[in-house]
Amino acid sequence: MSQDISNIRRALSRVPTDIKQGNFISAVKSMRAASGALYRAPMMRAEQEEFVRLLGDGAALLRSNKEITRIFPLAITYVPGQEKALSEALDQLLSVLEENATEGMRDAMLKMEERKRAMLEKGREELTAGTHDEARATFNLLLREFDSDSDLAVEAGEAFIQAGLYSDALQFLNRAAAITPDSANLFNRLGILLRRMKVFPEAEQSFHKALELEPKEPNLHFNLGRLYVDMEKWANALKCAEAAQSLDPAFAEAAKLAAYCKRQLGQ
């Protein structure tokens, strides 16, 4: 028996197990390959008899399976010598199964999104009510379930910022940064939060990281300049304000910042 026929036979022999376990797509693909091999590939008589027997068993199992009959009203029948007709019927069944699987996946994704939104709203309501420990538990559970969702971690962080709980917010924004370390916007958010917390060296690092990723974004230069004003590093602040102006000559706030820094420097 050739290697290809041997592989098809092994897959065909697993059809009863696949059907029992609900792996219908795998079972149908195996049967389709076997029926195609019967009318295309030369086989010894013993091989043909084994394929015919296994295909007959598989067709019977498909006909008697309640889930298959629910979504596919046509009975899968197999008459030896009519493998092409079987292949065509299996193609139709496979199409229905794959469409059904896609719909199931879409439904699952919608349910997952609904749960995400519901838990996010629950956490926000707990923050508004002042039940901060409950909110922390809700958001931490949410981020454990959706541990690769950077936007969700940002939303959690913003919720804690609105509640004035900056240390908690910082944890969530740091988690988001770990998920998407190439987001200039995220490091800008971190810089703004750290500036509010008056953790100036870390804020400076965050703004510099954002500028490494987006060096031509005037708002990032401006935000770093505002940080330098808080740190009373007037020359640094002026340099940032002028960089923002250079990138966006219509940036009025950057012009005001530059003028303010010049006054502080006695210029």
Image: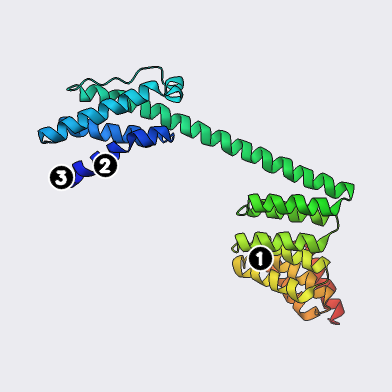
Along the line of sight, the residue nearer the viewer: 240 or 187:
187
Residue 79 vertical placement versus 250 (above, below)? above
Instruction: Give the crowd class for mark 2: few <14, some 14-19, many >=20 residues within 10 Å.
Output: few
Say which amino acid is labelled 2.
Answer: Arg
Residue 232 in the image: state x and y as whole percent.
84, 78
Query: Can you identify the residue that label 1 sits on?
Result: 247
Whether residue 250 is visible to the viewer of this picture, yes or no, is no
Q: Secondary structure at mark 3?
A: loop
Residue at x 22%, y 20% (from the top left corner): 79
Say which amino acid is labelled 1.
Answer: Leu
Mark toward the start of the polypeptide (2 vs 3): 3
Q: Nearer the viewer, mark 3 or mark 1?
A: 3
State the image quarter where residue 186 is shown. bottom right
Q: Secondary structure at mark 2?
A: helix
Quadrant of the rendering where the N terminus is positioned: top left
Mark toward the start of the polypeptide (1 vs 2): 2
Residue at x 70%, y 55% (from the top left corner): 154
Residues at discs 1 and 2 in contact (Cβ within 8 Å): no
